[in-house]
Image (spheres, grey):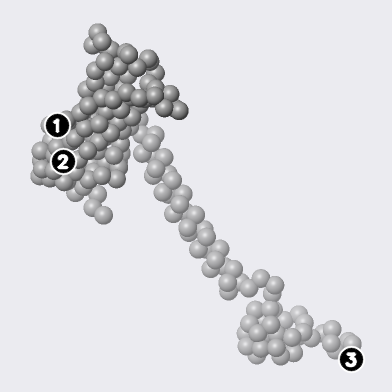
Amino acid sequence: MAREEQSTKQCRMCFREIDRRARACPYCGNWQGRVQLAVFVPVLLLGFGLGLVAYGEWLEWLGRRLRPDGRAAGAVAYHGQISVTQSEMFKATSADGDIVFVVGKLRNESDVEWEQVGVEAEFFDPQGRLIDVEAEDHYLEHLIPHGEMAFKVRVVADRPLEEYADHKACVDYAKDIRRNPW
């Protein structure tokens, strides 16, 4: 009897006695291995697919950051279609050090909706020499036709705050929303 018990086992699904060496139950067809391939393989494939999507998103983000011209894919240079209508410079000291802000408004003079607007701020010393520059990408905002949008450019000052006497803000690039419809 002991010999007979060792040659059989109970099916994990239907609980019938089956041959100990059986990989699948001859009655219900349930896989008898320790790891259920019916669950393991789809989970593995799903994880692999999600990993590929995340990797693709990461590569796209990295590509935007490492482009030699600093522009997002599909961004084009502008010739008066977006203008800076107002800008002011503020200086402050924080835990990060001395900071210079430029805040202002952009106006869309065209019939096109723009996104991923890049604003550049140039900083000048009291003699009018360029001493610092910073570009800020506004990826989440959309600038509707003939509309306005606020912007902010923040730079940690490389020089003493007294040397930041004046500024100039301009639009460096933006993306025509018609080129990449969602």
Pinpoint residue 139: horizontal percent, then vertical percent.
30, 42
One can see residue 26 in this view: no
Residue ID at (61%, 72%): 37
Q: Which amino acid, mark 1?
A: Thr
Residue that badge 3 annotates: 1
Q: Which mark is residue 148?
A: 2
Foreground label between 2 and 3? 2
Q: Which amino acid, mark 2?
A: Glu
Q: In which quarter of the image is the C terminus?
A: bottom left
Query: Looking at this rendering, what residue extends furthest in the top direction?
Result: 127
State the image quarter where residue 86 is shown: top left
- Tell me, yes or no, whether the two marked residues, 2 and 3, touch with CB atoms within 8 Å: no
Q: How far apart are marks 2 and 3 (CA)?
A: 88 Å
Q: Say what secondary structure mark 1 lies in.
A: strand
80 vs 124, left or right, is left
State the image quarter where residue 74 is shown: top left
Residue ID at (70%, 85%): 11
Residue ID at (68%, 78%): 32
